[in-house]
Amino acid sequence: MGESFKFSRKSEAATTILIVLIVVFFIGWLVNVGQRECRTNKECGSESYCGSDFACHQYPTIQKTIVQYNFIVPSIIMGIAIVIAAIIFNRGSKTKEEPQTIWQQAPIEAAEVEEISEPYYKSNGDVKTP
């Protein structure tokens, strides 16, 4: 009879400690929720937002940088390079013999065409196998 009484006292003490711990955690959670400045962005002003630390923060100002490229100098360099290349190619063609136009060329003589005695394509019957 004495042993069962000790066992029930131990279980009562454990249950009491468990309940006290649950109450302490619940009170801590309530205090944490109560200290929050905001839960959504609507609770902050129009120029601020609710951060992950549940406090209102001002929106950062973002400065937009506009980059403008100037392609005048590279286009001038490319133009000069094209003109120099054209001059080099023209100078090379002037030193060679100038091509004649068609009416200035000598007439083309008809060459004799050799008659082929064997046909170009052979049929299967003409092919001899060893």
Image (cartoon, grey):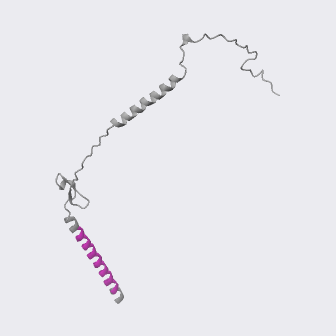
Residue at 24% in and 68% down: 29
Q: Taking 27 as reference, is 94 left or right?
A: right
Residue closest to the far left? 45
| Vertical arrangement, residue 17 with respect to residue 49, above or below | below
Query: Which residue is located at x 19 percent, y 65 percent?
Result: 34
Residue 7 among magenta residues: yes
Q: Is residue 1 visible?
A: no
Specify start and end residues of the magenta stretch as a single range: 6-29
Residue 60 sits inside the magenta stretch: no
If the image is split into quadrants, where does the N terminus sit?
bottom left
User: As rendered, which of 113 and 84 lies closer to the eye?
Assistant: 84
Residue drawn at 16 percent across, 54 percent down: 45
Q: Nearer the viewer, residue 1 or 61?
A: 61
Q: Is residue 42 above or below residue 80?
A: below
Q: Give the x, y percent position of residue 38.
A: 20, 59
Q: Can residue 100 be seen at all in this image of the molecule? A: yes
Residue 72: name its quadrant. top left
Q: Residue 12, image x and y in percent?
A: 30, 81
The main secondary structure of the magenta stretch is helix
Across and down, in percent, residue 76 comes to: 36, 33
How many numbered circles does the render carry? 0
Vertical order, 104 against 60 (above or below): above
Residue 86 lies left or right of residue 50; in this view the side is: right
In which quadrant of the rendered image does the C terminus lie?
A: top right
Residue at position x 27%, y 46% in the image: 65
Q: Is residue 80 left or right of residue 54?
A: right
| 72, 87: nearer the viewer | 87
